[in-house]
Image (cartoon, rainbow, N blue to C red):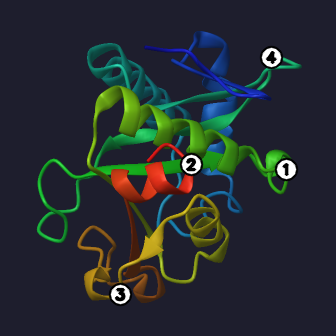
Amino acid sequence: MMPIRTERLILRNWQERDRELFHRINCDDRVMEFFPFRRDRAAADALMDEMRDDIGRSGFGFAAVEIAATGECAGFAGITEAEVEPHLARGAIEIGWRLAPEYWGKGYASEAAEAWLRHGFLTVGLDEIISYAVATNHRSTAVMRRIGMTEDPASAFEHPAIPDTHPGLKPFVLYRLGRDAWLKRNGAA
């Protein structure tokens, strides 16, 4: 199933050459502004290995985003099972992204996300894809809106894994997109 190609990107499984960038985005204060922790190299390597294995098993997950013209890894995007119980139903599939700052503002997150929506709805056969973020993370929620997702205010939640020492990071918003709405938006209905 992988890689997935777009006009400017290659969405692929992780490679050894991606480790430095993966660590950098997971400890960068700008990238991790809405997370209460930073990962050291060992923790970043372990997470990258886990993500690579997940993709190997299921054919989807949080995959490397490579700039096709240069071969540079810019970060990651993908779909994966959401793990925020009891706030989200078991089996809910989320879409997400994380790019290094030098790749922000170029449309790469939206382009990768659009490709993952297509893959999720047409190849995997999902009925719905969700996304969630800290309520004040306006960059991420802007991408959610750009790719056609709609906020579900009734499903906003306080993230149970965020420690009380970071109260501003606890409130989360949730966005949804169903297959029928995606098909209509993309002229495939």
> How dense is the environment of label 1, judged by Cα within 10 Å: few (below 14), some, or many (20 and up)?
few
Mark yes or no: residue 61 visible. no
**SS label for mark 4:** loop
Mark 2 residue type: Asn
State which tag comes first along the sequence, 4 or 1.
Answer: 4
Mark 4 residue type: Gly
State which tag comes first along the sequence, 3 or 1.
Answer: 1
From the image, state whether disc 2 or disc 1 is nearer to you: 2
Q: Residue at x 46, y 73 (%)?
A: 150
Mark 3 residue type: Pro
From the image, state whether disc 4 or disc 2 is nearer to you: 2
Residue contact at pointers 2 and 1, CB within 8 angstroms: no
Q: Which residue is mark 4?
A: 71
Q: Residue at x 27, y 80 (%)?
A: 155
Task: Name the residue nearer the viewer: 128 or 95.
Answer: 128
Residue contact at pointers 4 and 3, CB within 8 angstroms: no
**SS label for mark 1:** loop
Q: Which residue is mark 1?
A: 106
The alpha-carbon separation of the residues under discs 4 and 3 comes to 39 Å
State which tag comes first along the sequence, 2 or 1.
Answer: 1
Q: Which residue is mark 3?
A: 153
Q: Which mark is residue 186?
A: 2
* x, y percent for residue 185: 54, 56
State which tag comes first along the sequence, 3 or 2.
Answer: 3
> How dense is the environment of label 2, judged by Cα within 10 Å: few (below 14), some, or many (20 and up)?
few
Task: Name the residue nearer the viewer: 162 or 153.
Answer: 153
Q: Residue at x 51, y 18 (%)?
A: 13
Q: Residue at x 55, y 70 (%)?
A: 34
